[in-house]
Amino acid sequence: MRVLFSAPDWARWQPALEAACPEAQFVRDAPAESVDAIIYAPGSGIEDFTPYRNARLVQSLWAGVERIVSNPTLTQPLARMVDPGLAQGMTDYCTGWVMRAHLGMDNYAQDGIWRNGTVPPLAHARRVTVLGAGALGMAVARALKALGFDVATWSASGRGTEGIAAYPGNAIEDALRRAEILVTLLPDTPATRDMIDAHALSLLPEGATIINPGRGTLIVDEDLIAALDSGHLRHAVLDVFRVEPLPPAHPYWAHPAVTVTPHIASETRVETAAQVVAENLRRAMRGEKPLFLVDREKGY
């Protein structure tokens, strides 16, 4: 099987892929008609997939596929990356920031003033809502539940897991009203863009915190800033933005109630992701359905 690698960081990926799938031939360039599968990331060179008519799989190295799925020339099966290492990284990021918000760790300026008038509640008394119940959302929800938080998820499908309340699509307002801490892990689709607007923000409890490592298009920036300025929201931790890198003049940088992190919540880990790629390549070789196929209508 000849596999075209059309993504950055070939030097890092090559040894991991060759070790995980030695039966495949990985190449950086080849006649299009000779390619059996493509490992892909946006911006890596391929814009027209039409010549690759024999490719049985396009395996994305990204969890998000919004920059790929809209390409009209891409008719081959497309699989998104669901990587255990990526899920663990996202879990680490979200649990860390949820704990920071829960404990009020930013309340203690190191200025010689003894501030012991406020004791945070125990985790079981803190309500956290995770928007998104895919692989990343469920990993984060389970980890927060294990720490004792009162966790619920929301997704269009309403899918859930044992011990965690799950709100379906038509119950988004109920999911927001309970969210003292809101974690957003939704994909970028027409249905989710601008979802967190002034109305949605007004439903959050007074003093709520938002943590967004999902997609920058989910939040209406001006509405979030207004909610923070009014004091309705306490804090926002933002890792993703409509324009990246976030321009130096953007008001998020200077806002006292915003923490900007530079899209580092999680990333695909070569060592674990190579195993996922290898399994899908083997499935493609055998004519079987790949794992984590993208639903073109839903966009993820």
Image: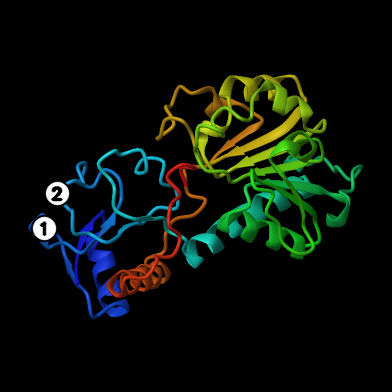
Measured as percent of width and height from the top left, residue 15 is found at 25, 74
- Closer-to-camera residue (43/47): 47
Element assignment for label 2: loop
Q: Is residue 189 left or right of residue 111?
A: left
User: Which residue is label 2 attached to?
Assistant: 51
- Closer-to-camera residue (21/140): 21
Measured as percent of width and height from the top left, residue 117 is found at 92, 42
- Closer-to-camera residue (34/19): 34
Residue 285: image quadrant is: bottom left
- At 76% from the left and 40% from the top, the residue drawn is 175
Please, is residue 78 above or below residue 131 in the view? below
Instruction: Tell me whether the residue at label 1 lies in contact with that at label 2, contact meaning CB atoms closer than 8 angstroms.
Output: yes
- Residue count near mark 1 (Cα–Cα under 10 Å), binned few <14, some 14–19, many ≥20: few
Measured as percent of width and height from the top left, residue 222 is found at 59, 19
Mark 1 and mark 2: Cα distance apart in space: 7 Å
- At 30% from the left and 39% from the top, the residue drawn is 71
Question: Which circle marks residue 33 in the picture?
Answer: 1
Q: Is residue 233 left or right of residue 114?
A: left
Residue extending furthest toward the right: 117
- At 67% from the left and 38% from the top, the residue drawn is 210
Please, is residue 202 above or below residue 93 in the view? above
Residue extending furthest toward the front: 287
Q: Is residue 275 left or right of residue 98?
A: left
Q: Amino acid at mark 2?
A: Pro
* Total count of labels: 2
